[in-house]
């Protein structure tokens, strides 16, 4: 069973199937889509944001820290042909954290699986082509 399945619906609109969940990805109208869902690169940024928050929360829970509100705002710069893609991750935490907690949270945030995958130069992607059975 694949981790995710994408199925074309109409135009660039794509239905994503992840376990029992269904999402829509699309392109904005100015790029030929119907804007019925986020762009794939926006979903990638959302994956990094959610993984960062979950990883920090799991760590804080193990440490017995009550963090309260926690946010990760992720930006993504679409590269030109010769550039490297780049992400910015801005963690937003309650003001009452100690300097030591803030430093540790930054270290832990960089250890989330999506962050590690995106930062790796050793990611391997194997492509194949199979016919769709009617």
Image (cartoon, rainbow, N blue to C red):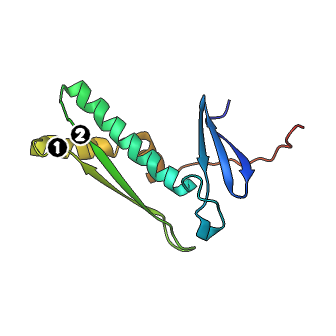
Residue at screen point 50% across, 55% down = 42
Q: Quadrant of the C terminus?
A: top right
Residue 29 seen:
yes
> Which image quadrant is residue 12 in?
bottom right
* Residue 4, placed above or below residue 26: above
Q: Residue 28, how many percent across, how many down?
A: 58, 63
Closest to the observer: 12 or 60? 12
Quickly name the residue at label 1: 94
Q: Residues within 10 Å of mark 1 (few under 14, many from 20)?
A: few
Q: Residue 129, how many percent across, how many down?
A: 80, 47
C-alpha distance separating marks 1 and 2: 6 Å
Residue at screen point 50% across, 67% down = 78
Q: Are marks 1 and 2 in contact (CB under 8 Å)?
A: yes
Quickly name the residue at label 2: 69
Residue at screen point 18% across, 46% down = 103
Q: Judging from the image, what secondary structure is the residue with disc 1 in?
A: loop
């Amino acid at each position: 069973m694949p981790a995710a399945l994408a199925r074309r619906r109409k135009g660039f609109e794509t239905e994503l199937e992840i376990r029992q969940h269904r999402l829509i990805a699309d392109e904005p109208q100015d790029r030929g889509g119907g804007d019925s869902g986020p762009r794939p690169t926006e979903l990638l940024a959302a994956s990094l944001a959610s993984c960062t928050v979950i990883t920090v929360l799991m760590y804080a829970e193990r440490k017995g820290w009550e963090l309260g509100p926690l946010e990760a705002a992720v930006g993504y710069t679409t590269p030109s042909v010769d550039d490297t893609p780049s992400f910015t991750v801005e963690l937003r935490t309650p003001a009452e954290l100690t300097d030591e907690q803030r430093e540790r949270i930054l270290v832990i945030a960089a250890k989330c699986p999506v962050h590690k995958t995106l930062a790796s130069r050793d990611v391997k992607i194997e492509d194949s082509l199979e016919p769709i059975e009617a």
